[in-house]
Image (cartoon, rainbow, N blue to C red):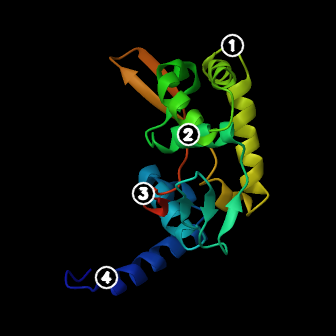
């Protein structure tokens, strides 16, 4: 292979090699060569053309700017949960939500200005209780709203989804973090 190939020529060569591996039924080798992290980056790059900027206004309206400024209709509690997960692109495990109680409370107070403060506190306590199903219900509602506005593949970048990370400590200890994340590239999220 010539070291002076242009990026376009390299892309053509790669396309030829990919087609050859696929013809031979060796997608396993193709995946191994590309690697999962790069595959995820490519998935995001492919979706960027379909993803809309998400504008969060000063009064906490969620607007999909590139979908004719269509508003994402969520209740204040759903907005608070969404804002919490947007603020943590690294993800949060539901079992540790209690550690985020004060932050969630601030978001809920901001999005529900007309609600009774005691009701807001009670709602947050339900959300951060690991024995309560409230957080799953709120995430399901958020997912349903986005799915009603766009196809499932595109919506998957906007709703709160699962991401499992495997950790290995030493030679015989393995544990998993079951993170919940919003995968939309943060440069597409605009706070007014």
Compared with 34, 100 (above or below) is: above
Indicate which disc, 1 or 2, sits on the residue closer to the N terminus.
Answer: 2
Q: Is residue 149 left or right of residue 96?
A: right
Q: Position of residue 100 (x, y in %)?
A: 49, 25
Mark pair 4, 3: CA separation = 17 Å
Cβ–Cβ under 8 Å for marks 4 and 3: no
Q: Position of residue 106 (x, y in %)?
A: 51, 32
Dot 4: element: helix
| Occupied quadrant, residue 47 | bottom right
Q: Is residue 36 left or right of residue 153?
A: left
Residue farthest to the left, as pictured: 3
Please tell me whether mark 1 or mark 3 is closer to you in this view. 1
Q: Residues within 10 Å of mark 3 (few under 14, many from 20)?
A: few
The residue at which mark 3 appears reads as 38
The residue at which mark 2 appears reads as 110
Please tell me which residue is depicted at 68% across the width and 28% down the height of the picture: 135
Front-most of residues 169 and 89: 89
Mark pair 1, 3: CA separation = 37 Å
Front-most of residues 136 and 72: 72
Please tell me which residue is depicted at 76% across the width and 55% down the height of the picture: 147
The residue at which mark 4 appears reads as 7
Indicate which disc, 4 or 2, sits on the residue closer to the N terminus.
Answer: 4
Cβ–Cβ under 8 Å for marks 1 and 2: no
The residue at which mark 1 appears reads as 131
Mark pair 1, 2: CA separation = 26 Å
Please tell me which residue is depicted at 47% across the width and 79% down the height of the picture: 16
Task: Using the rendered image of the protein, determine whether residue 79 is visible from the camera's viewpoint.
Answer: yes
Q: Residues within 10 Å of mark 4 (few under 14, many from 20)?
A: few
């Amino acid at each position: 292979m010539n070291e002076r190939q242009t990026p376009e020529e390299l892309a053509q060569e790669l396309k030829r090699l990919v087609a050859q591996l696929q013809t031979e039924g060796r997608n396993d080798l193709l995946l191994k060569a590309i690697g999962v992290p790069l595959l995820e980056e490519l998935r995001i790059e492919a979706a960027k053309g379909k993803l809309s900027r998400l504008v969060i206004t000063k009064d906490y309206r969620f607007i999909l700017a590139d979908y004719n400024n269509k508003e994402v209709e969520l209740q204040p509690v759903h907005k608070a949960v969404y804002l919490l997960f947007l603020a943590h692109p690294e993800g949060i495990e539901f079992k540790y939500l209690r550690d985020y109680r004060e932050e969630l409370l601030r978001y809920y107070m901001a999005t529900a200005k007309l609600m009774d403060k005691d009701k807001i506190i009670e709602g947050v306590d339900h959300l951060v209780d690991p024995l309560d199903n409230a957080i799953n219900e709120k995430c399901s509602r958020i997912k349903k709203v986005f799915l009603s506005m766009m196809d499932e593949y595109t919506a998957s970048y906007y709703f709160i989804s699962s991401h499992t990370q495997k950790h290995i400590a030493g030679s015989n200890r393995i544990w998993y973090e079951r993170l919940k994340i919003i995968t939309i590239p943060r440069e597409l999220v605009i706070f007014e």
